[in-house]
């Protein structure tokens, strides 16, 4: 056997031994860490390739990195924004609009006010509904009075998203069809006879202004 062939054979044998040793070491490491000893397809890694000089002798092996190898920078995932809440979501979560939410359900308006909008809602809180007689409220929530209840609730809704700073005195058409009268005195805003006690509660589909009494559309 020639000296060149003999040296080439030794290099090949060493390459096989190194590969086998690496595989056994990997299996042993998995076993020590309590991981199942299963064989997985290894990711591409640098390979040892012998090079031959023009004289015919074998030189020290060089490292050849396969295409796409190396450490790549981690891709930054976009931050997930919190889920935006609709007018109905805010009313439910707030806890001060239990009667309003009950009325919206009875009138079948939950889906409407959860839609794209935008809407401006002059929302009576529970204290505002409490100013109605118990008999009146009970009567409004009856299925046979759904149309009347819908008329009252939509009288509290204006199309578009209007913040308090943009409210001007005058009459504004409501979703019900009739108009409400807006009055502005300094920072105080009135809607018919109701006072805005908390303004600019922003939602994903509009804005809520809390009022201190239920307003009724004209007959």
Image (spheres, rainbow, N blue to C red):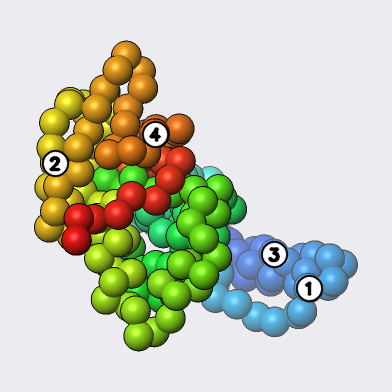
Q: CA distance from mark 1 to mark 4?
A: 67 Å
- Of badges 1 and 4, nearer the viewer stands 4
Q: CA distance from mark 1 to mark 2?
A: 70 Å
Image quarter of residue 39: bottom right
- Of badges 4 and 3, nearer the viewer stands 4
Q: Are marks 4 and 3 in contact (CB under 8 Å)?
A: no
Q: Are marks 1 and 4 in contact (CB under 8 Å)?
A: no
Reading the image, the residue beneath label 4 is 195
- How far across and how far down the image is residue 139, in percent? 45, 75
Q: CA distance from mark 4 to mark 3?
A: 79 Å
Q: Which mark is residue 172?
A: 2
- How far across and how far down the image is residue 53, in percent? 39, 47
Structural crowding at the residue carrying mark 1, measured as other residues with C-alpha within 10 Å and reported as few (<14), some (14–19) or many (≥20):
few
Residue at the (31%, 31%) spot, across then down: 190
Left or right for 159, reference 99: left
Q: Nearer the viewer, residue 47 or 59?
A: 47
Residue at the (35%, 74%) spot, across then down: 107
Q: Earlier in the sequence, mark 1 or mark 2?
A: 1
Q: CA distance from mark 3 to mark 1?
A: 17 Å
> In the rendered image, is residue 159 in sight?
no
Q: Which mark is residue 22?
A: 3
Reading the image, the residue beneath label 1 is 35
- Residue farthest along the top direction in this orientation: 186
Give SS at disc 2.
strand
Dividing the image into 4 quarters, which one contains the C terminus? bottom left
Q: Earlier in the sequence, mark 1 or mark 4?
A: 1
Q: Earlier in the sequence, mark 3 or mark 1?
A: 3
Q: Which mark is residue 11?
A: none
- Of badges 3 and 1, nearer the viewer stands 1
> In the rendered image, is residue 40 in sight?
yes
Structural crowding at the residue carrying mark 2, measured as other residues with C-alpha within 10 Å and reported as few (<14), some (14–19) or many (≥20):
some
């Amino acid at each position: 056997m020639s000296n060149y062939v003999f040296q080439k054979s030794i290099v090949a044998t060493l390459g096989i031994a190194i590969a086998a040793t690496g595989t056994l070491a990997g299996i042993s490491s998995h076993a020590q860490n309590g991981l199942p000893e299963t064989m997985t397809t290894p990711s591409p890694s640098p390979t040892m390739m012998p090079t031959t000089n023009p004289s015919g002798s074998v030189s020290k092996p060089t490292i050849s990195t396969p295409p796409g190898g190396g450490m790549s920078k981690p891709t930054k995932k976009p931050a997930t924004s919190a889920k935006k809440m609709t007018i109905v979501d805010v009313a439910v979560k707030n806890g001060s609009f239990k009667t309003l939410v009950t009325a919206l359900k009875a009138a079948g308006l939950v889906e409407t006010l959860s839609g794209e909008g935008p809407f401006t809602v002059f929302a009576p809180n529970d204290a505002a509904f409490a100013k109605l007689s118990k008999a009146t409220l009970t009567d409004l929530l009856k299925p046979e009075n759904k149309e009347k209840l819908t008329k009252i609730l939509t009288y509290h809704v204006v199309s578009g998203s209007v913040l308090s700073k943009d409210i001007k005195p005058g009459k504004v058409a409501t979703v019900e069809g009739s108009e409400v009268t807006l009055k502005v005195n300094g920072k105080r805003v009135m809607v018919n006879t109701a006072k805005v006690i908390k303004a600019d509660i922003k939602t994903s589909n509009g804005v809520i202004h809390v009022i201190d009494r239920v307003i009724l559309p004209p007959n």
